Image: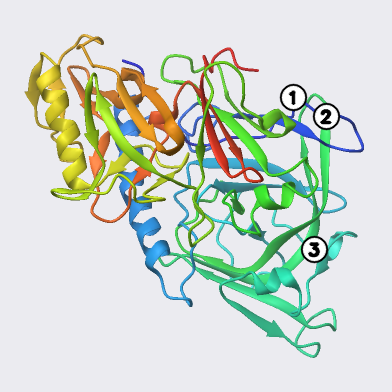
Amino acid sequence: MASLTLACFTLLISVIATTTTVTAFTVDLIHRDSPLSPFYDSSTTHFDRLRDSFLRSIARASRFTRATTSSPIESRVISSSGEYLMNVSVGTPPVEVLGIADTGSDLIWTQCKPCKQCFNQNPPVFDPAHSSTYKTLPCQSSSCSNLDQATCATAAESSNGQDTCQYSYHYGDRSYTRGSLALETFILGSTAGHRVSLPKIVFGCGHENGGTFDESGSGLIGLGGGPLSFISQLSKSVNGGKFSYCLVPTATKSDVASKISFGKAGIVSGAGAVSIPLVSKQPDTFYYLTLEAISVGEKKLLYKSQPNKVVAGSEGNIIIDSGTTLTLLPPGFHDDVVSALEAAINAERVSDPRGVLSLCFKSKKDDIGVPVITAHFSGGADVKLNALNTFARVEDDMVCFTMIPSDDVAIFGNLAQINFLVGYDLDEGTVSFKPTDCTKHL
């Protein structure tokens, strides 16, 4: 049975409208655990890497929970265990940096010289003093007001003799970054010679950074829905807040990369496409949908947030996140789905020896008779999930259901999104799904 543990991507520009005005572009997504990834560990098995991605899902969910219930002084960003990497060049002349691409946070930041405290990184540390396009932002700027935590360095305190907005993010795992909020040119390019230049991108120049960040990376690139995210900033220059991705089942097609597209290239439409309304909630970083029910075959089960409490009309009850591998559901609702699946599948039920997954079957066959599972979202949008989206082989003789219970937060994870073209339109306020063979999606 095919399975996926999404992880990291590098940027290879494949579509550019013009060299002066960018309206659309597409980049490759490279699996974190593929040999192309700096995180690849050839000494581990596919099953080990899959299990590790499950554990990252659980850790990530706990940080989503803290973000949605945090006090105003606590950062809303997710920690450094992001599932993607993004290669970009920063500054003039450009310096390549490698950042964790995170759909669960907004601020773009990278380590900067001079370092008061920096973690070890393999790529060169960006030095703003050598860039002609670097410009710090004043404390009165609108971007500074969009930060959860900001202080002001006076003209006397700043190296450039001007008051400067200072950001400070503290992560759930005690990692941190502090530095200056600034404007800089970001360049996306490929070995084919195509380059997309994005001037005046707001980012954090981190002079104090530490914690659990990996030396392969340089910082973080926020892909959430807040005003400082890469997506929101692109919306001003790349034809609106539109992007889409198509996730390949890389366990069986490791030579084919997934794709993410921006601007006009991110529009999802046509036969088979369904659109789900995005729900506006705080924090605005996250992408909230309303899940009304799940059908196992012909058996429809209404969404429950608590045992015996049906809340099908509760708006924004699930977050869609490409950086979380598993799908998380409220315990009572999850139990209903598991019961229906157990009744429908004629195979020997066994326990997950790691204790992470709640429904497993002993079988060396890929086809154990998994019924189609349909996720019923608001707006009449039905997303039909195949076995590829809902079960994964975790041992040679064991397959398990990849949805787990969660008391605090519901997340529609990336395994459930395999072989769909998933499009976000922040202007229209929708997320669209279109069944697609992502191994053939350009």
The alpha-carbon separation of the residues under discs 3 and 1 comes to 29 Å
How much space separates mark 2 and mark 3, taking CA atoms? 25 Å
User: Disc 3 or disc 1, which is closer to the eye?
Assistant: 1
Q: Residue 365 falls in which quadrant of the image?
A: top left
Residue 89 sits above or below residue 366 on the image: below
Q: Residue at x 27, y 35 (%)?
A: 403
In this rendering, position of residue 154 left or right of residue 41: right
Which residue is more in the foreground, 17 or 94?
Answer: 17
- Circle 1: element type: loop
- In this orientation, which residue lies closer to the viewer: 435 or 261? 435
Q: Which mark is residue 14?
A: 1
Q: Decide: few, some or many residues near mark 1? Use Cα within 10 Å; few <14, some 14-19, many ≥20.
A: some
Residue 13 location (% of width, % of height): 74, 29
Tag 2 and tag 1, C-beta contact below 8 Å: yes
Three-letter code for the amino acid on which mark 2 is drawn: His
Residue at 23%, 16% in the rendered image? 370
Q: Which mark is residue 392?
A: none
Write down the residue under mark 3: 128
Tell me which corner region of the image, top left, top right, bottom left or bottom right, holds residue 57. top left
Which of the two discs, 2 and 3, sits closer to the camera? 2
Q: Which residue is mark 2?
A: 194
Q: Residues within 10 Å of mark 3 (few under 14, many from 20)?
A: many
Where the C terminus falls, by quadrant? top right
Q: Is residue 211 visible?
A: yes
- Going from N to C along the chain, the mark reached first, 2 or 3, is 3
Residue 163: x percent and y percent?
A: 79, 83
